[in-house]
Amino acid sequence: MRIVAALGGNALLRRGDHPDAAVQEANVERVVTALAALAHDHELVITHGNGPQIGLLAVESAADPALTTPYPLHLLGAETQGMIGSLLARALHNALPGRRIATLVTHTLVRADDPAFDRPTKFVGQVYSGKAVPTLARLRGWQIGRDGDGWRRVVPSPIPEGIVETDTVHELLAGGTLVICAGGGGVPVTADPDTGALTGVEAVVDKDLTAALLAEELKADFLLILTDVPCVYEGYGTARQRPLDDATPSRLRQGGFPDGSMGPKTEAAARFVERTGGLAAIGALDAAYEIVHGRSGTLVRPDLMGQ
């Protein structure tokens, strides 16, 4: 079975972790332990988030006196693909001796006129207190949004329209390679309608929506969205909270899940299932093997006639 596994943005830097390299190197061992069993039995493509890492690089770039202007988000996204991809590739190489592993810096096509550029919603970087918001907005020109009990930078997150390197990923899979790609949703680019020339844009594409598109283009059998909760919960955080073990795309779209957390995950799962007839699931990273085998998580299956 061909599986596309999308790791949550906090897989390597969890809330409360210091953003040190050593912390991420330690956390990657947990990630690889969760995925190695799947890699033994299936074709595996791994994507990952980059919210904490790109936020850290953005802060460093904005504060660097040697720079005339901070590095744009598309270049910072490419940096995070290389960094996180290297950590994953090395750990997988050690866990799966003899297996071909490749990390591919991937570019995601978006529309220049996507309305998301006028309505930033994607959280990146660390959590700040409310007191820091006016200073950050003024000094760095950032837009800030509430994330839970704190505040974080928000940036545009346009819809992914295509992945430039899909054919290359196909060829790598055909050769038995485990591929790490589309990290952070891929480097966002627009294509000139006449020449096809690519231009980077100031945005971060949602990694779950990119993973769904990648899984569709690769004709994957299963989209596995891994996060820090065991399943999708209806009424999350309320007295009516209850786990959703089995769902259809239409059921997920009735759930009203928030944009900043579960919303993109449920939408990505729904899109993949609708467009391909395949299966998707959402659940905890440590239960990846159990999720694929139907023992954990929220399974998303096609709508049946009349549902």
Image: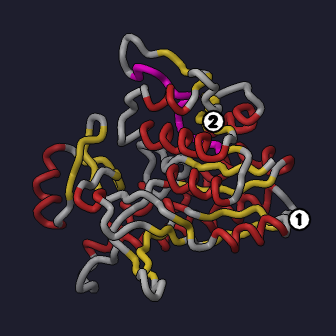
Residue 297 lies, in percent from the top left, at 63, 29
Residue closest to the eye, 204 or 273? 273
Left or right: residue 210 compared with residue 276: left
Q: What amino acid type is highlighted by mark number 1?
A: Gly
Q: Is residue 21 visible?
A: yes
Q: Residue furthest right?
A: 98
Check disc 1 and report the residue beneath it.
98
Where's residue 120, x and y in %? 27, 55
Closer to the camera in the image, 102 or 84: 102
| Residue 176, position as x, y percentages in the image | 85, 64
Q: Secondary structure at mark 2?
A: strand
Query: For the residue marked with disc 2, what is the amino acid?
Result: Ala
Q: How is the image coloured?
A: secondary structure
In the image, taking residue 78 as reference, residue 87 lies left or right, namely right
Sequence-wise, the earlier of marks 1 and 2 is 1
In contact (CB < 8 Å): disc 1 and disc 2:
no
Mark 1 lies on a secondary structure that is loop
Compared with 116, 177 (above or below) is below
Query: In the rendered view, does 306 fall on the left or right side of 239?
Result: right
Magenta span = 223-236
Asked whether residue 155 appears in the rendered view, the answer is: no
Mark 1 → mark 2, Cα distance in angstroms:
29 Å
Name the residue that disc number 2 marks: 281
Judged left or right of residue 103, residue 12 is left
Q: Percent position (x, y) of residue 24?
A: 55, 56
